Amino acid sequence: MNLVSSTALATVLMGSVAVAQDVEVQNSWVSGSEAQGKQVVMDALAERGFNWVDASVAGYENDDAAFMSRIQAGDPPAAKFYIAGRNAADLIAGDLMQPITEVVSEEAEAALPELIKTAMGGFQGDDEYYYSPISVHGESWFFYSIPLAEQLGYDEMPTTWDGFFEMLDAAKEAGIMPLAFSGQSWQTNKVFNQIAVSILGADTYNDMLQNANEDIVMSDEFRQAIEIFDRLHDYVGEGISTLNWNDATAQVIRDEALLQFQGDWAKGEFIAAGEEVGVDYGCAITPGHQDMMIVVDAFTFPKVEEGTEGQMALAETLLDPEVQKGFTTLKGSFPARTDVDMSSYDMCAQLANEKMKANEIAADMAIVSPRFVQGALADLINEFWAAPYDYADFQDEFIYALSY
Amino acid sequence: MTPRSDTRPPRFRNWPAFISLTPVWLTALGLFVGTAIYTFYLSFTNSRTMPSTDLVGFEHYVRLFDARRWNTAMVNMGILCVTYVVGCLLLGFLLAAALDRKIRFENTLRTLFLYPQAVSFVVTGLVWQWLMNPNLGIQNTLQGWGWDSFRFDWIEHPETAIYGVALAGLWQGAGLAMIILLAGLRGIDGSLWQAARVEGIPLWRTYVSIIIPEMRAAVATAATLLFMGIIRTYDLVVAMTNGGPGSSTELPAKFIMDNLFNRQNIGLATAGASVLLITVLAVVVPIFFVRAAQQKKARKGH
């Protein structure tokens, strides 16, 4: 290529960039459904005259490490994907993050549940919002094989733990593996917390985590949650300690196992395998209180010298009900706003949305607890699963980890 | 060269070399000693997501030694030192001694034994995870052939999992030990063998009393390399068990990395790193002094 044409090309390229202001977005959305959902946000942002520049790193922790090194180098991206809540709390407290309160309309505020609004404030207590939430995952689910449930004579799933264990016993007697279970640390954690929410109820559970409430940890109810968790050992298969969560889901898909405790991301596995909800597989909320544990996908905005308009535009785009609808339909989650028309969603997402409207929601540890507390609790729960020990000791250690 | 005697102290005699090496020395000091001191300092601050300067005393060390996971990790490092280092040395020596008997196909066998070394720890970890998986691996196959009581699912049980990791490491590390020890064996003067044969000393006795003592340097080299491998082992465990079941296969390096990057807990991570460094020094420094003293004695003896 000669000099003249390359200069011309460079001019054209620069020209096209200059039209839309860039917003560099650090995220860990790389899987098929995530990338598709991301495109919806990109398009909506482009309509507002801004250009999403993608900086994605596979894996939430890896992405976070990349982001932190950029923060420390003083060269932050314009936006960063985070679970809303404590994740960026240190950065907000260090005055490194940009509040986005101005773009949260009254209408949006009215449509967001209190719990999510608290998470958006990053637990700073300064009446500012720092996270712009886009979607919510429900985590208090178990997914079951409908053919196996019918074989056992269950048209509906039991709503009490006694009934639940009766069903598991029936499965065991019929020679069916009752529980598909992954023994990986984050999986044992999700299951334990799911049980804790179901036994304690959302409000008590939230109180326990947010206020490190010792009385709740020492209560009979919490002890009952440990018992139920421990009892699950009798219903799981072999070789689970290194089993991936989605390989466990596959056991339910292949009708080898009756059910699996899992967040709503499991739906993606069923759909990819060509299964239909209500026909091949069903979703049911964990017995007991039947409250919904949630985790909120959101973005935060580091303070930058220029480009704040782009950040505000992105924050506003993420809160747009249409964008939330388009994104969550593709990603398999549901909108953070409760005023989105849910009729096109599947029954699981609709049910979760109902729970959110009724404020029967509990916040996942990932929202409420600092990462080092989450880690200490995760180790504890995972160690207990691998080698159960005295429940009273577990309660003591739980308090110690919670008060970190 | 003029034979004029130089009365300056030796370190000033080579001043051009001294000057040209100074930047390297300063860099090395800054990188190794400086960062180690900074790490040590951070472990006494309340650094979480970002480094901080607020001192909190021994708070992180209290948390560290209260953590079941850290204690398991330190014990596991000890277990690996015994099983993996000693195992690799023993197996490596047996392989090297066998190859050294001037057998046929020595080159082929040597390559075969060294092959695992060409595989990354991630691959080793995954393959051994599958081999020990009760649903896919060796256990399932042998039970399928009718040996119902056969168990080979070490990594599924907290009590045995770390030995499963040691076994996988042994498979990978024995080749390296073999090649270093083989070089040591080849370096032994042939006349020693002949003398032993003339004296009618049995073969095993020749190895134990003459050959192995002569190979001290090779053994020390191999042991040091294997030992350093354990201190930094991270990938093998991540790929094979990810520290599980529970915390039963955790190692200090993994604990530190997790706290540094995933858990936004710089304070605890640097406390762990400091304890690890002190532990290693506590083992290495006495050995160093003993060896230095031995060498001094040996020089005086000549």
Image (cartoon, rainbow, N blue to C red):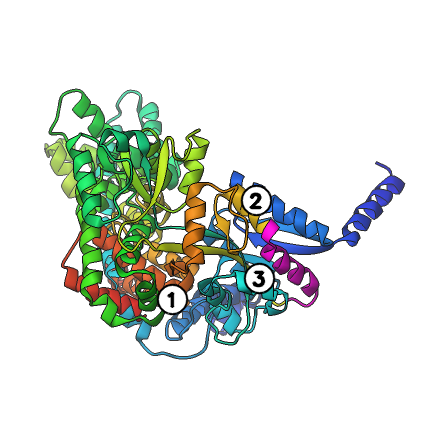
Q: Which residues are magenta?
A: A304-322
Say which of marks 3 and 2 sits in front: 3
Quadrant into which the C terminus of chain B falls: bottom left
Instruction: Name the image quarter holding residue A253.
Output: top left
Question: Who's the residue at 25% across and 71% down the image?
Answer: A214
Decide which of tag 3 and tag 2 comes sooner along the chain.
2
Tell me how far mark 1 sits from mark 3, CA to CA. 43 Å
Q: Chain of mark 3?
A: A
Q: Which residue is mark 1?
A: B270
The subunit letter for the residue under badge 2 reads: A
- Percent position of residue A287, x then y: 27, 50
Quarter occupied by residue B252: bottom left
Task: Give the labeled residue for mark 2.
Answer: A37
Main secondary structure found in the magenta portion:
helix
| Chain on which label 1 sits | B
Query: What residue is shown at x 13% (from left), y 59% (from top)?
Result: A390
Three-letter residue code for mark 2: Gly
In what element is the residue under mark 2?
Answer: helix
Quadrant where the image shows the N terminus of chain B: bottom right
User: Residue drawn at (56%, 73%), measured in percent from left and top?
Assistant: A95
Q: Quadrant of residue B58?
A: bottom left
Going by the image, does A39 lie left or right of A57?
right
Residue A134: % across, % down: 54, 54
Q: Of discs 2 and 1, which sits in the foreground?
A: 2
| Left or right of A251 on screen, residue A295 | right
Label 1: which secondary element: helix
As drawn, the residue found furthest toward the right would be: A4
The residue pinned by badge 3 equals: A108
Q: Amino acid at mark 3?
A: Ala
Q: Amino acid at mark 1?
A: Thr
Q: Of residues A247 and B127, which is closer to you in this image?
A: A247
From the top left corner, tell me how far across and down residue B230 is, in percent: 31, 50
